[in-house]
Image (cartoon, rainbow, N blue to C red):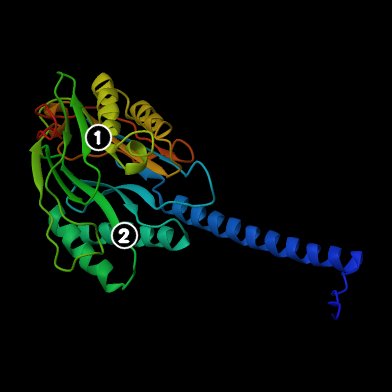
Amino acid sequence: MTPRRRHPRPASADLLTTLGRLTAQAREGAQLHHTRVELAEAIQLEMLPATLPVLPGLRAAARYAPAQHGLDIGGDWYDGFRLPEGALAFSIGDVQGHDVAAAAFMGQVRVCLRAVSAVVSDPGEVLGRANEVLLSLDSELFATCSLLLFDPGTGELQGARAGHVPAVWATVDGRHGIAEDAGGPPLGLVPGAGYGVTRRRLTAAGSIVLLTDGVVEGPSFPIEEGLERVSRIVREAAGGDPDELAAEVMKVADSTGHADDAAVLVLSHDGPDALTDSDGRDGPDAPAGSEGQTGSDGPNGSDGRGGRGAAGV
């Protein structure tokens, strides 16, 4: 029987060289991943607004929290801007994906909504046209979002949703609800999609909270429980300072049990007299308070009719 020849063992120096090379490659891969994450974070934070628009009787504040663990970056965003005829627009949304491409797509969605809102006054039509524009980009990504348009002259609030988490609202007189209005599919998925519009008059002071699913859904509890937790917070603080309310709502995200990013946008307004008496006059936009949060100065409030899914926002 012929004895099998053993392959010679590498010398210690060769083994150390190999280990060093593999370690360097792993380090380079990790550094590249971290660089991509840092780039995505920079893109995302740069695209969040530095200010939110304000009016006499209306204040707004927002908070954003990046993913808590791991190397992924989400695509959540919020926005607020003035329209040519004096109305205000507010949006919040979430892009599918957790990388540089998702952060860049988020910027495209945000800019698209601003551009279309400047020439179209119906929020459902805004979402419909934005959907077609995003489909024309031939991207594999899509986004959920909510869009609110507020007319200070009439006190009317128009809203439309594209597959997004419902808003939560409460008034100082005790009414509250979760506005599960009919909407449409996420943006960038279905050609020719339609988006229903809900129109409401703000008849009482209170607060409206727009948020992303990272705030209310995770392994620790389902989205229904998360929304109820937020609803309790909003009921207790209705009509209060929007920045403080945004901070309290964001705490719910800490208990969801997952690492997704999260965004909250709060609108607080005084009663209809405070809003309509302004005749559309606006003050300076409010500066961001710090990284991850945006605030505004001015009075406060909201409206609604009470109960889950009621027309209260």
Q: Nearer the viewer, residue 206 or 234?
A: 234
Q: Neighbour class for label 2 at 10 Å: few (<14), some, many (≥20)?
A: many
Q: Residue furthest front?
A: 1
Q: Quadrant of the N terminus?
A: bottom right
Q: Badge 1 is on which residue?
A: 224
Q: Answer whether residue 54 is visible to the viewer in this image.
A: no
Q: Badge 2 is on which residue?
A: 109
Inspect the image, locate mark 1, and give the three-letter code of the amino acid beneath it.
Glu
Q: Quadrant of the C terminus?
A: top left
Q: Position of residue 158 (x, y in %)?
A: 13, 45
Residue drawn at 31 percent across, 72 percent down: 137
- Which of marks 1 and 2 precedes in the sequence? 2
Circle 1 SS class: helix
Q: Is residue 35 above or below residue 304?
A: below
Per the model, the C-alpha gap separating discs 2 and 1 is 27 Å
Q: Position of residue 93 (x, y in %)?
A: 30, 50
Q: Position of residue 48 (x, y in %)?
A: 40, 49
Q: Quadrant of residue 39?
A: bottom right
Q: Neighbour class for label 1 at 10 Å: few (<14), some, many (≥20)?
A: few
Q: Nearer the viewer, residue 114 or 7?
A: 7
Inspect the image, locate mark 2, and give the three-letter code of the amino acid beneath it.
Val
Circle 2 SS class: helix
Q: Residue furthest bottom?
A: 2
Looking at the image, is mark 2 or mark 1 nearer the viewer? Answer: 1
Q: How many marks?
A: 2
Q: Is residue 285 above or below residue 22?
A: above
